[in-house]
Image (tube, rainbow, N blue to C red):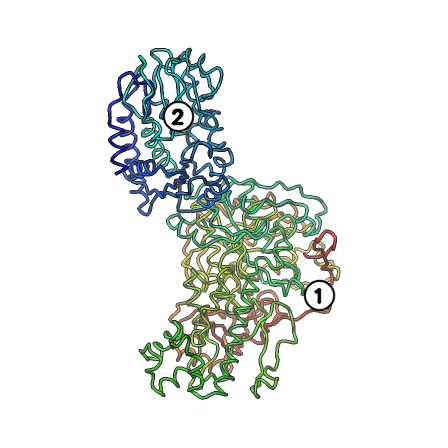
Amino acid sequence: MRAAALRRWLAAPVPAGAWWGRGLCGERRGDGAAAARKITENAKKALASLKRENPQLQPTLAIIQAHNDHLTQEVNKKFAEEVGLRVIHICLPEGSDKDEIVNEVLRLNEDPNVQGLALDLPESAYSSKVLNAVKPEKDVDGLSDVNLGCLIRGDAYDCLVSPTASAVVEVLENLDGKKVLLVGTSGALGASLQCMLQRRGAMTMSCQWRSPQLQNKLHHADVVIAGSTKPEDIPVSWIKPGTIVVSCSRDFQSEKHQCGQQNNHLVENDVCSLAIAMRMQNMVKNTERWIRSQQCRKWDLHCLKLQPLSPVPSDIEISRAQSPKAVDVLAKEIGLLTDEIEIYGQTKAKVRLSLLERLKDQPDGKYVLVAGITPTPLGEGKSTVTIGLVQALTAHLNINSLACLRQPSQGPTFGVKGGAAGGGYAQVIPMEEFNLHLTGDIHAITAANNLLAAAIDARILHENTQSDKALYNRLVPVVNGARGFSAIQLARLRRLGINKTDPSTLTEEEISKFVRLDIDPSTITWQRVVDTNDRFLRKITIGQANTEKGFVRQAQFDIAVASEIMAILALTTSLADMKERLGKIVVANDKKGQPVTAEDLGVTGALAVLMKDAIKPTLMQTLEGTPVFVHAGPFANIAHGNSSILADKIALKLVGEKGFVVTEAGFGADIGMEKFFNIKCRASGLVPSVVVLVATVRALKMHGGGPNVTAGAPLKKEYTEENLQLVADGCCNLQKQIQITQLFGVPVVVALNVFKTDSPAEVDLVCEIAKRSGAFDAVPCNHWSAGGRGAVELAQAVEKAANQKNSFKYLYNLELPIVEKIRIIAQKVYGAQDIELSPAAQSQVDRYTQQGFGNLPICMAKTHLSLSHQPERKGVPTGFILPISDVRASIGAGFIYPLVGTMSTMPGLPTRPCFYDIDLDPITEEVKGLF
């Protein structure tokens, strides 16, 4: 009824001689209703075109209303439906204060499903505080200071202009030299009108209804524009005959009165309806901008300046000397939306997986893997190269690029290796936050891992000490007089072939099958973990308290990053996939030789809850302010040694088709790179574009027969003086790693990390041998001492290599027997003559094959210090038989891992651990001694 009344009122003729009508009285520039129809039709066509290109598009305009005029609401809804927009009205109580309105505005600002925000409020509520609470990019009424400033500066294309002001100007013509009085208009609307009218050649004046100068100004005005309702005691006679009078009041109802007779020009146009049509036009324009904002673009990245010093200070001094950007600023620069990040402090933020859905149609960028020669105690600097390369690409070549790194374990940080944030002028900052707790992912993994371990031993204890009936009553208790299975228990019943949902209907045999896992303690492979190097936890005895009723067994702790849950985090592709993988974890066999899983123990959902935040990559930055994702940290010698698939996938979408994502594989190419290709790429479906193989002159000298190096002792002269023969002999390892890369059909660029002790002849020799051995290019790099500028040549080589033909292929077929897959890796990658399985290893291979796990990829657990199983054998060992002492399975992660020789999954502390040098200043709270 109200909408019909409004339509009748809008269509009614204006009484002759009325100088104050319902919306517009003045010379005709064009029929306002016709103009509104035309604008609506054009907006409808434009939106339809956008929807054809974006089928999932559902643009939404939110209107906050704080009065009881429902007619305004219905008119907005009618126009929106005509155009094809979705409108939601938030109706606040009449009399709501400004803080209540602002709170609602702030909520809608952060709603990713709302593309436009408009305000229909009482005149008194339109304060600067309220108007500027609206995000400029959602401000379809164009009243925020940002949009108003653009209009005044003449940047109308880059802003949204007030629909009311646009409607007033639309219905007026020939304003050149005319005197226009703005009465009862102030604030943003008044400023918009003055700006637009003056550009049309009008001379503008303004005053309020109660101004003493009102009568005089009305008498001289050619056009009067009123922004609020005329008081009844203002006489009509104050206006001179022939004056054009326009009302742009938001109050429809108050404009329905008549204000006397006067010989003024009248037309039947309506500013309010035209303004609403233009609001919808703004909304369509805003939707188009929103679509563009969702698409990948060249980043508007503010890079941080470096001023490298010589000699180069310590890593933590360099890190602390740079002031990082606020992480929300960095996120916005690279195209992340506000609702896609969860901020941790000032410099870290979790990135939500919803971004993958938003950018699902965005082409991926180039995918670059950084690997290395066989590691030595002298270090090769893969992390430093990774960071230096993205600094060069982004900060110096203006190419979107993102590094994806593993989160370091605190074991090595406080043990012997130190941190893993890169070094020199190629670092992730703040490096102490990177190297310590970060956002708590490893702690979440530790909690989840140990919850599962506790569940195993508790279940064995309870089954050993209770009857079937007692177990059943406790596992399926009566709650509020009713008894029911949980979802995970129903799933177990289905796996057992028991298709019943009523606990009272199970037979005694079915109850026994359901309640008893019958875990064989001697087959338990799931260990507890802690993120500390603690050699005395390598073998322990558990269950010695009297309360455990004699259930004692030998067990062990692994370091947290060796947990299968860490590998699952690194290999998962979604939250649902992670939950499924967690449920598939095999913890032991039952007494019949069948696998027992986390799902059988009923703990899958709880593990997923503990991991729900850890699945999100962490955003940080380099010293030059370029973005870095830090996520997952599996070791490469006892796991697959790569950062997460999710971080890579998100990064590949963010950089865009012409951008680069650079990630790192642990240890040498024979270890981390082989697993990257055969395990990670299989799980992700991603195809790498280039491999960067990192080497140093002094590490090659060690592979060529140089003397052993002792940590902390001065380097011997072989490493500090030119020795071309030693370098040439050591290049055999570099050549072998190039050959390994070529097995996978990916172009390889050698990055030679240059030290001040390297002679030009040694550097030239390494680069020459590398190119002769099949590398696409070999480039000396100085990013450690110069930042990204020192890796520009490497970045250019990588960019060229990425455009080469890529014939990527896996090393082996998954359908091959487990032993044959192990043999292929041993012979083709390590250079072994053959493999030799222990009886225990062969027994495990037979068991996994019988259990249906034979088609999984292989994750070799071997020393990283040699291509062989003997750490002391440098260069390229040949003729050796690779011993396989045991074979285990990470079914949730999705691989079989053979143990080569003796491999410890718990490192120990050296005589002088790194923690001797780590300290905290109690006054400044600064961390000291990290490197």
Tag of residue 654: none
Nearer the viewer's eye, disc 2 or disc 1? 2
The residue tagged with tag 2: helix, strand or loop? loop
Q: Position of residue 29 (x, y in %)?
A: 30, 19
In the image, residue 133 sits, relative to residue 620, either above or below, namely above
Q: Three-letter amino acid code at disc 2?
A: Thr
The reply to whether residue 178 is visible in this rendering is: yes
Direction front: furthest residue? 233
Q: Three-letter amino acid code at disc 1?
A: Pro
Residue highlighted by disc 2: 229
Which image quadrant: the C terminus? bottom right
Q: Nearer the viewer, residue 645 or 67?
A: 67
Residue 588 is left or right of residue 485, and the answer is right
The residue tagged with tag 1: helix, strand or loop? loop
Q: Position of residue 442 (x, y in %)?
A: 56, 63
Q: Nearer the viewer, residue 894 or 919?
A: 919
Q: CA distance from mark 2 to mark 1?
A: 80 Å
Residue highlighted by disc 1: 913
Q: Which badge, 2 or 1, is on the more N-terminal residue?
A: 2
Disc 1 crowd, CA 10 A, few/some/many (<14, 14-19, 20+): some
Q: Position of residue 903 (x, y in %)?
A: 58, 74
